[in-house]
Structures are given as structure tokens and as C-alpha cells.
Amino acid sequence: MDVSSEMVIYILPLFLANVLGVQTSIIGLIEGMAEATASILKLFSGWLSDKLGARKWLAVAGYGISAVTKPFFYIANSWGLVAGVRWFDRVGKGIRTAPRDALVADSVTKENRGLAFGFHRAMDTAGAMTGILIAALVVWLTQRNTLDLSKTTFQTVVLISLLPAFLAVISLAFGARDVRVEGRRAAPRFSLRGMGKSFIVFLAIVSIFTLGNSSDAFLVLRAQNLGITVTGILIMLAMFNLIYSLVSTPAGSLSDRIGRRRLIIGGWLVYAVIYLGFALAQAAWLVWILYVAYGLYYGLAYGSANAMVADLAPAHLRGTAYGTYNAVIGILAFPASFIAGLLWQRFGPSAPFLFGGTLALIAALWMMFWQPKVHPVDGA
């Protein structure tokens, strides 16, 4: 699915800005609304997977909705229509994410949980890298090294993205299976208190970080702002995903040995340095270095944070915990992206990155001084 999704999503802000002439505040609004919608559904779908004791078919349904939605990007001719298609695509993501993550956690032992989520992120990102390279090839063949993206090029990429999207749905439907977890029972009414104090504090720290973690669309626009062509941006994104993919599995395995918290702190510190670098960058070559290094943040922190959710929450509430975690991240993505767009318009392209880097430093410091307690009941 990531082969399909990333080849479209990464050039979508360029399509909005270059073809439709949309302002950055509207781009931020579209991204924020889409992610917020997905987040609300993640909370419900995670809880429902706990109640049903089944994850797989909710995940299949979510991937299916996203696959069916993609062809409509081809006919999108206004930012309102793009927003609608993006919204339905995120509905699919909202339905699938929490059940899928819970299924991963159900399928492995706690001793290998970091490795499993690291490997998941590595494969996820390898697909993204492949999709971006395909998009880069299409851009190079259709418009060479021009600075702006054309409508025809975008539509060609959308058409190519359909095949891997539907193959993903088929492979999940026929290749995956649900795993029974000991101690699972009917999910109670939603309650944060039932998931423990450590989980709640973890959500609060993640919330601080996420409020400054605006859509990566702004990184793409910043690269174009400093003169990098569409083809150059896509090659840069592919290199970023290569680093992300290479780092994720060993970082996940390392988190099993030395603890998730250290990896998350390291990733957030890398993020802060990179965002401050984007704020100060004046040359295209520096953006290249920063964006490729950005893969270190994802590789260190993303899978480790997902594994930590399973560490802190009781096994029978795993779906609800992942739904809550992803909901918090996604809901805050709306103000994060909208604030970033407004800061860019009012104070210039450096402002959103200064804001994001500062909040990342605050979150990393809080995480350093926090001592979490792993939940004593673990069904894996």
C-alpha cells in the first residue's frame, strides 16, 4: 500500500501549489482535516477490534476504502475535491491503523516487540521508497527537471498507483490471520484511566511533540522554495526513506535491549536539530542533507513509540490503546499543520520549523526525566 500511497501523497502538495495555486494555509487545512478525521476513526476501530476479538477484517476494510478512493485523485480539479478525496483516503487509514498495529503486537512475544515494529516500519518505508522512485521516474520522463509539477504528470502517477493499492488489499485478505490473545475479554466503555497512569503521561508527552510535527508537505514545499526541482525532491524523498528503512529494524531490536525511551529521545533530538536546520537553510544542498538525515528520526522513534504503546497498556485493551495513541497524534495533526501554514504565510518559511524544533526539544526533555512503568499484565 505504501508503494501506492507515497507516490501520490508526496507530490500532492506540489499539485495543489503548482497546478491549482492553493495557498500554504489551505494545504495545511486539507492535511490537518484529513489526519484529524483518520484519528477519530482510529479510536473507534481500535476499540471495536478489542470488542470483536478480531483485527484482520477491519484492517482489510480500511485498506480497501483507500484503494477504491485513489482513482478520484485523477479527476480532481479543485482544492475542495482534492480535500474530499484525501478525506475518504484517510477514512480508510483511520479504520485500518489501530487493528493492524494491535495485530502486529498480538503476533509476537514482548521480547521481540521492538524488532517486530521496527521491521514493520522498515517494510512500510521500503514500499514508500519504491513508490517515490517510480514517481520520480515518471516526472523525469514527462517533464525532466522543471521546477513545477504538471497536471498530466500527476495524473499519470495516480494511474500507476492503482495496481499496488489493490494488490495490498488482496495480500492482506488472503495472507494474514487473527491471533488469539490470552485474557482477552469484551472491551469495556472507553476509559483512559483503565490503561494506566504511565500510558496517560506518555500520551501527554507525545502530544507536545506532535503539536510541532506538522505535515511533511511543508518540508517538500520548503525544498521547492529553495530551488529543488520536482525530480530532485522525489530523489531526495527516496533517499530519506532508504535511511528510514535501514535504521528501523536495528533500532527496534535495540529498543528491546536498552528500552524504548532512549530511542524515542534520540529520535526527537534528531528531529529538533533537523527542523532548526530547515529553518536556517539558505541552500538546496543543505536541504538535501537535512531531509536524508530526517530518516534517522523516523527510524529511531517511530517504531519504538508504537512498541511502547503495547508495553504500557493491558493486552486486552491493545486495540483501544493503539486507537487512542493514533487518535491523539492525528487530531493534533490538524492544529499542527494549520499553525504551520499560518506561520509560513505570516512570518516566512522558517517560522514553522522553528516552532516544531522547539516543541520537539521540550518533549525530549520531559521524556528524559520521566520514569514509565510497564503494564504488569501482558498477553503476548
Image (cartoon, rainbow, N blue to C red):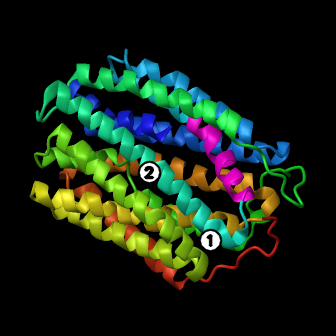
Q: Position of residue 343 (x, y in %)?
A: 27, 51
Q: Which residue is mark 2?
A: 125
Q: Which residues are magenta?
A: 91-107
Q: Amino acid at mark 2?
A: Thr
Give the answer, above or below, for where 340 lies relative to 96: below
Chief secondary structure of the magenta span? helix
Label 2: which secondary element: helix
The answer to whether residue 158 is left or right of residue 2 is left
**Location of residue 299 (image quadrant):** bottom left
Amino acid of disc 1: Val
For label 1, the residue is 201
Q: Which quadrant is home to the C terminus?
A: bottom right
The mark that comes first in sequence, 1 or 2, is 2
In this picture, residue 88 sits left or right of residue 314? left
Q: Are marks 1 and 2 in contact (CB under 8 Å)?
A: no
Residue at disc 1, secondary structure: helix
Whole-percent x, y for residue 18 in the image: 20, 29
Q: Nearer the viewer, residue 212 or 248?
A: 248
Q: Mark 1, residues whose alpha carbon is within 10 Å: few (<14), some, or many (≥20)?
A: some
Residue 84 is situated, as x and y percent measured from the top left of the image, at 46, 24
Q: Which mark is residue 333?
A: none
Residue 289: image quadrant is bottom left
